[in-house]
Image (tube, rainbow, N blue to C red):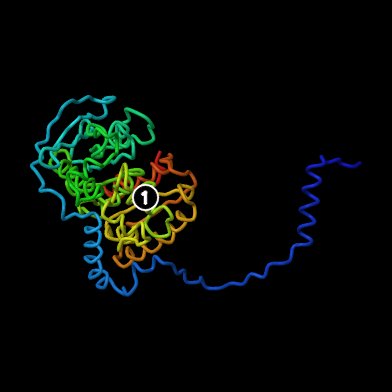
Amino acid sequence: MYLRLPFTVSLILFCSANFSQSAPPVDRKRSDPPIIRSSWDDLTEGIQSREDWTQRHPVLKQRFLDLIRDDQKPKKPLLDLKKHESTVVDGVYTRILISYNVEQGERAHAYLGIPVGLKSKAPAVVALHGTFPQGKQRVAGLLDNPDKAYLDHLCRQGYVVIAPDHFVAGHRIPPEGPYDTTRFYKKHPNWTAVGKFTYEHSIAIDVLQSLSEVDPEQIGALGHSLGGHGTLFLAAYDERVKAAACNCGASFFRHNSQADAWARDHWYVYFKHIRPDMVKGKLPPIDFHEIMALIAPRAFLDLSGLNDGAPLTQRQRLLMLSGVMGIYELEKAPQNFAFYVHGRGHSVAHESRQLMYGWMDTHLKPDSATKTQLISNDE
């Protein structure tokens, strides 16, 4: 009795059998791993010890401060923190609309979330929104994509959270429209938008540390997209950030055919002063791997999509991040650096959120918060 197979199955079996008969054998031999070399090796070039890195660090820090033109920031004013409205969300946390000074005659608005019934000082997180006109409302879970409602998610896990508006969004949308920096550069022609938002996010840490509910030594930062690289810049800038997580935080300068977007001449202009060199193909003297390395040995997690933008550029991120790991190893803190690369594009999917929040738990909460235990057999 013959078993008659469908034509398609028969064809697959035939092709498989034919391939197995005709394919040449592969001669694979055991070997040591080859050394991977890339342009990102300049981070550790000439560095043999932690002492060497200690000497390199301030050089890179100054290049970073020069890039954002930190010397152009205004004098920091008194906070003058004000609370405008508050509501208790599901009996779990209180969400408060606050404002505070960021420079003379200019106030930032933010949502502040404080868990109900705190019995001790809590860890706190600066949660930064991406490019969204209503800014902080998305982080609070009031509008748009609930995947990006970090304030709501983290407050339910015991964190105090501040979600500030970007300086051209939310309460501060300029007349030209959301994220238009024309008016900013008229006021501060020699500063940068990156310097402005990094400085303001540092002031948000001042706000957190002024609160009696907050443990001032346990401050984290996280964000997606514009908020992602905002988190990177903030952590490199302000050493009070103990743990940071950058989700889909833009592409770097090198190996990026769209690098001049960092210095475009319209709408949201990150670095106005580097445009003349960028249009000639000359890059700034510091890149993302060097900025990330400034965070070491403090905790930093980078999450990115291989299919977020130009695929070949994003694949370079793997080499870049491997280079950063070298610095964490020199600092004897490899456990404080991690990266997660996926194929979900420009997203904050469930697993990415779990990694970011788990990263905060690991580095900002006591060991008991993440400790596992065996099940007792006692009856």
Q: Is residue 292 left or right of residue 102?
A: right
Toward the viewer: 238 or 251? 251
Residue 59 lies, with reference to residue 182, above or below; the image says below
Residue placed furthest toward the right: 1
Residue 349, picture quadrant = top left
Tell me which residue sits at (74%, 66%) in the image.
24
User: In terms of image quadrants, where is residue 37?
Assistant: bottom left
Name the residue type under label 1.
Answer: Ala
Q: Position of residue 262 (x, y in %)?
A: 34, 51
Question: Relative to 165, is 281 above or below?
Answer: below
**Viewer-nearest residue: 198 or 342:** 198
Residue matched to label 1: 261
Instruction: Locate residue 197, reporting x and y percent.
Output: 23, 45
Camera-side residue of 318 and 316: 316
Whole-percent x, y for residue 257 in the image: 43, 55
From what the image shows, is residue 302 above or below residue 281? Answer: above
Give the residue displayed 29% in from the left and 65% down from the top: 331
Q: Residue at x 45, y 54 (%)?
A: 314
Disc 1 secondary structure class: helix
Tell me which corner region of the image, top left, top right, bottom left or bottom right, holds residue 177. top left
